[in-house]
Image (spheres, coloured by chain):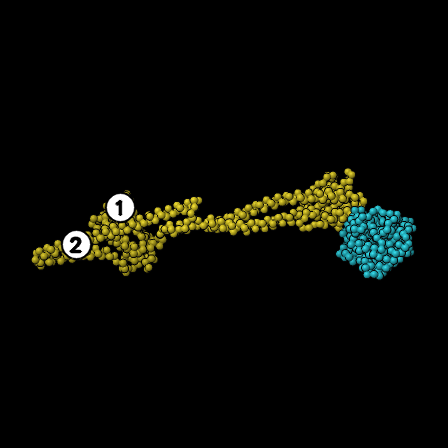
Amino acid sequence: MLDRRRVLLGMAGVAMAPWVAATSHHSGLRIGLTPVFLDDQAAFLSRWRDYLQRRTGLEIQFVQRSSYREILEQVVSRDLDLAWLCGFPYVQERERLRLMATPLFQGKPEYHSYLLAHHTHRANGIEGLAGGVMAYSDPNSFSGYLYPRSQLQQAGLSSDSYFRRSFFTWSHRRVVEAVAVGLADAGAVAGYVWETMARLYPELVSHTRVIHRSRAYGFPPFVSRADLDGRLFDTVQQVFLEMRRDPDGAALLEQLNLDGFIPAEPEMYSSIAAMVEQVRGG
Amino acid sequence: MFRDLSFRYKIPLRATLLVLITAFMLTAAIVTREYEQMRSDIFDNAESLGQVLARTLITPIQHDDLWRAFEIINIPAQSASPSSLAADLLMVVDDQQRVVVSSRPLEHPVSTPLSELGAIYAALADEIGRVGLYASQSVELSESGFFHLLMPIVSDGVSLGVLVIEYPKSIYKPRFYSIVSRAVVVTLLVLAILLPLSWYWGRRMAEPLVQLSDCMGMIGERIPDTTECRLYQSRDEIGQAGEQLRRMLHALGEKQALEQQIIASERLAAIGRITAGIAHEINNPLGGMLNTISTWKRHGQPEHLAEKTLPLLERGLLQIKETVAALLVEARVQSHPLTDADLQDIHTLLQPHIHNKRLHMHWEGSLQRAVALPSTQVRQVLMNLLLNAVQAADEGSGVLCTTELKDGCLLIRVENRGEPIPAEKQAQLFEPFVSGNPQGHGLGLWVTYQLVQQMRGDIYVNSLPSGETVFMVCIPIGEQEK
């Protein structure tokens, strides 16, 4: 699993290749990426990195790992300066992180958790999936794990007994693929990823069907380690916020299927935090 | 059909057949060999693929990473191009023979027992359960269109499951067809080169034979000169045959020249004999008449002598006239078609002669209808032959006469027993003035011969030393108007 990530990392750009296990004492900016978006487009990542370098005047390094947990740990341990994380890991470690920017998806800093089923499956909600095979994206994903788990919990069910089998694909994208090919009967996925894939891969996505949409939750934010230099924080935040105002940034946003970035506020994630409490309490 | 073909075509056709047989045998041999090679290739390929995959699958299975496992087995299943030795299906099965993951997840859902996936997989489940796999094993279930490779997934001596790789038995087909089609193309190319060559060689080989046969075909009425035949010069068998033919032609030519010489001299001899006969026949009465005239002169021409002399002269002149008339066979005598009554007349006319010699006459055959043959001539022929037979027959013996219509011919056969005709005489029998009878003038058979010839018929004689003499006449019917 690690190997695959490394290969992608290598493909992302020569500058990233000679990556050394680093400390925070470096001149550049190290940004951790998670599969909250379609993070496997190497050419796109290369263009985005170049853009950020140009705009910040800093040497940017994108770091990708196979799970949310690894990225989260690296930010917390100050190996990474910035990370694009899911709201769920953020609320778990919010004391040691600082919110920087939240993407705007369809004009709002929000997204939904989708429950997908194979297009031939008859279920019309999580109730119809008993005895099926369930695909989750990541144990630290809100939309891809926490939300459906809380749904089950509210119904007084447990994932292990309700489904015949469940597994993690470690990415939203692969949840969609697993449901599309029929490996899983159903899957939990970030609505944003599913919508973006529907635009890019309509054929694949047509084999899946959304059987449940959650209410809106805060979109996965960019966070920095808490002790990142204030001026640096402001510079980088400004670059994100202004991205939609220049053509290059707008083109990148277009490819991300996003409308722009706005400053992220902790209140945006309070409903996720409440759900974490609820699941832990239950 | 083929037997009658010229060697010009036979030889190239045989060469073509040989080329085709060779191409067919070679193709068959190559295809068989390739089939075996392909089989072992597939198994080797499956074996090495299985080993790599089984090792790669350990971590995803241990980590419960179904998607990763799916990706691993899906790559070889996806890479199917029509000519490759690609697997049709890959599947990981756990120790309870339940599907862990399959490259066709919709058909083989996760965690489904193998036994619920149809007869083939139930049989495979039995096979896996029976053996307790620790080494790869290939399974060829006769009732299915697939063969399977079972590869155990083992980590540190513990079995995690079995990787099943399924190949359709028809996997050979594209390769098989490509080999056969290539063989066909090569064969056609070889034929395209060899056929004109073999036709050329075949014609070259056949040419001397054809020349030989053409030359032999010229031999008929005329013997061709050796310079007229183009013959192949060589020391091989055909060359030797040509040389022999040339010698034969030379000998035949000499023989023909000799025969022509003999015929010419025989004709001259015959003319000599005929002339002598005519001279003799005319001379005899002339001598008598001259004597009579000389007597009449010597006696001073008295009246009574004149009365005696003139009849004498008349008889002599009549004799000469008869002789000459016999020699000039009347060719065109108007006569009615031959009927049975004409034959009966002959029979009646002969009766006195038969009685005189106390012979038995056997008369066979009768005509049911009138036959388009001139009756006068046929009557004379039959009369002449029967009179001869009666004369030659021994006293008290029998004479046989048969007449019949056969193969468009009037066939007359006259047979008697008596003094045989010597062989040397038989050759001259139909010439005039040749007679076996001292009293006859020897014109009877000659006249008969002339009449038969006029009617475009044939006459044969066969006289055996035992005394049986047979004359056969065959007169074709319907040839007379020409």
Q: How many marks?
A: 2
Name the side, left or right, on which B267 lies relative to B100: left
Q: Pick whichever, A177 or A200, lies toward us.
A: A200
Within 10 Å of the Cα at label 1, are there few (<14), some (14-19), or many (20+) other Cα atoms?
few
**Looking at the image, which residue is at 90% across and 52% down?**
A229
Q: Pick whichever, B381 or B6, lies toward us.
A: B6
Question: Which chain is tinted cyan?
Answer: A
Amino acid type, residue under disc 2 in the picture: Pro
Inspect this view and state whether residue B83 appears: yes
Q: Where is residue A158 drawn, in percent x and y?
A: 86, 48
Mark 1 lies on residue: B424
Name the side, left or right, on which B131 lies relative to B353: right
What colour has chain B?
A: yellow
Local secondary structure at mark 2: helix
Amino acid type, residue under disc 1 in the picture: Glu
Q: Where is residue A247 drawn, in percent x and y?
A: 81, 61
Local secondary structure at mark 1: helix
Q: Pick whichever, A187 or B426, lies toward us.
A: A187
Name the side, left or right, on which B217 lies relative to B282: right
Mark 2 lies on residue: B285
Q: Pick whichever, B182 or B457, lies toward us.
A: B182
Please report whichever mark, 1 or 2, sits nearer to the chain's N-terminal start: 2
Q: Which image quadrant is residue A119 in?
A: bottom right
Q: Which image quadrant is residue B336 in?
A: bottom left
Inspect this view and state whether residue A147 appears: no
Quadrant where the C terminus of chain B sits is bottom left
Within 10 Å of the Cα at label 2, are there few (<14), some (14-19), or many (20+) other Cα atoms?
some
